[in-house]
Structures are given as structure tokens and as C-alpha cells.
Image: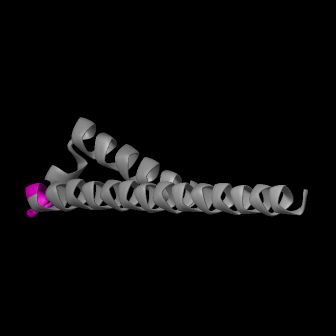
Amino acid sequence: MLGWVFVIFVIAVVSFVMHIIGWANAFDYGLFFTIIWDILLLLVALGLLTRMLILQRTGEKEALYNRVSDLEDKIKDMEHK
């Protein structure tokens, strides 16, 4: 996860600097180059968002599994008493 954050930060900084100083416009394909960076930044951000949603759902399922196992243990304890 930290790797994703670092990658998106680097791409965002490079894109920002390219927009500020007009570095990409020095090439014949400057607009195309800038758009590619923006699309890359968008895709990495979407990848990060997808990964976070997957981890959240996995965490919710794990929490429910732990809750069910705790309740099963309580039922077993009540049956033995």
C-alpha cells in the first residue's frame, strides 16, 4: 500500500512540474505526453482505490468470521454449563 502511495505521489509531482514549467511542450508531442502522464496518474489512483476497497471488504469478512467464531464458542460454553 505504501508503494502505491509513493508511486502516485511521484507521478503527481512530475505531472505538476511538467504543467508548471511547460517541460512537456518542448517536445513536438507535448500535449500527448502531458495527457499520457495525466492518464497514468488517474489509472494509478483508480488502482489504489480498488485495492483499498478490496482490503476493506476482506477486513469486514474477517471481522464477521471472528464474531461468528466467538459466538460459537459462547454457545459451546453455555451448552456445557
Please state which of residues 75 and 1 is positioned toward the viewer in this rendering: 75
Q: Position of residue 75 (x, y in %)?
A: 75, 59
The one nearer the camera, 66 or 7, is: 66
Quadrant in the picture for the N terminus: bottom right
Q: Position of residue 37 (x, y in %)?
A: 25, 58
Outermost residue to the top? 20
| Image quadrant where residue 53 sits | bottom left
Q: Is residue 7 magenta?
A: no
- Name the image quarter holding the C terminus: bottom right
Above or below residue 80? Residue 19 is above
Q: Nearer the viewer, residue 23 or 2?
A: 2
Q: Which secondary structure dominates the residues rendered in magenta? A: loop
The percent coordinates of residue 12 (x first, y second) are 36, 46
Instruction: Please tell me which residue is depicted at 10% across the width and 61% down the height of the picture.
Output: 32
Q: Quadrant of residue 35?
A: bottom left
The front one of 53 and 28 is 53
Magenta residues span 27-31
Where is residue 54? Give x, y as percent: 44, 62
In the displayed structure, does residue 72 sit left or right of residue 80?
A: left
